[in-house]
Image (cartoon, helix red, strand yellow):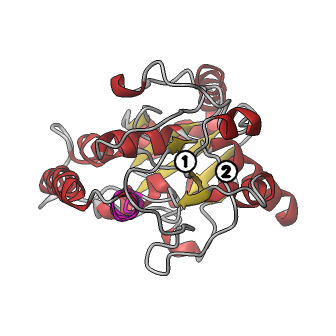
Amino acid sequence: MKKAVSIMIALVLSVLVTACGSTPAGTDAESGAQSTAAPAEKRVIAGTVSAMQYLDALGADVVAIPTTDKEVPANYQGKPEIGMPMSPNLEMILAQTPDIFIADMNLKATLDEMFYGKSVDLILLDNNSYDSIATNINLLAEKLGLESKAEEVISQIEAKKQAALTKAEGKEQPKVAVIFGTTAMFMLATDNSCVGSMVNLLGAPNITDDLGLGDAYVTFDREKLAELNPDVILRLSHADPAETAKAFETEFSKPFWRQIKAVQNNRVYDLDIEYFGVTANYKTIDAPSLLADMLYGEGQPS
């Protein structure tokens, strides 16, 4: 069972990522992101939605973008598309004669193989926590010669972070359960997940904290969940949000949930996937403030 769960988690993380890549490169020791040095004025392709958002925040130009149904920054609209992030078209990528391809670390194995021997530098970003946003901004700025712009962006991120922390200051800390759901399964998110890292940032205890669990997402049984009895439940959807929402409603209509404090007190919140995902993106900079409203907003115990 444990092996099956590990495989499922790996598959889930793979689907959640929006990325693409090139030839294997060195690993940045400080950030953990795979990259190679690249001077400014390079031909850059954003292989993922998150990469596209980071680059737009830095004011960088790109020669191509991923195919996506998500919002495309105004400056990138009309740019050539290179296919879906999970299945980019190598021919379309190479047709743009890129110098750099920016992707996600969770797709490293696939992308290393895909771009092996190609003269394209690969930057792989780690998007698995809230703190990775600033790390990625700094890494991309360094590689593209945009350090001065990065200072401005990081300042904005820090201001939003401090505003969220102010909302939590002096408030009673509710015990939180982050339930990650798909149409096929439900799991608990630990502090090693992106949303879990923000719960931790805001000082609220995660019910998984005392379980000694190292994975980002873990299975749970109802008896243990009832014992831990969270004050707040955050529901994190994936893949097909509409269908996952239906699955959540079906699950939470079962009698078991009526004994949970969060359900009794109407403190079950569905997280907006635009800001809350399994992996971070630039819009995640607004997530801590939104989360602080759920955990510490008006009408909550103080």
Q: Position of residue 132 (x, y in %)?
A: 41, 61
Does residue 19 sit above or below 255 in this rendering? below
Q: Is residue 59 visible?
A: yes
- In-front residue for pair 202/7: 7
Asked if disc 2 and disc 1 are in contact, CB closer than 8 Å, the reply is: yes
Badge 1 density bin: few <14, some 14–19, many ≥20, Cα 10 Å: many
- In-front residue for pair 30/13: 30
Stretch of the chain drawn in magenta = 130-143
124 lies left or right of 272? right
Can you tell which mark lies on residue 278?
1
Look at label 2 and name its amino acid.
Leu
Point 66% across, 27% down: residue: 247
Look at label 1 and name its amino acid.
Val
Confirm whether the magenta stretch covers residue 132. yes
Please, what secondary structure does the residue beneath circle 2 have? helix
Displayed quadrant of residue 225: bottom right
Please give the residue where the numbered disc 2 appears in the rendered image: 13
100 lies left or right of 250? left
Q: Position of residue 213 (x, y in %)?
A: 61, 72
Instruction: Measure the alpha-carbon separation of dots 2 and 1.
Output: 7 Å
Displayed quadrant of residue 6: bottom right
Q: Position of residue 17 (x, y in %)?
A: 61, 45
Q: Position of residue 231 (x, y in %)?
A: 39, 50
**Sequence-first disc among 2 and 1:** 2
Q: Is residue 234 visible?
A: no
Point 44% across, 41% down: residue: 276
Please, what secondary structure does the residue beneath circle 1 have? loop
Q: Quadrant of the N terminus?
A: bottom right
Point 75% across, 54% down: residue: 115
Does residue 57 sit above or below 197 in this rendering? above
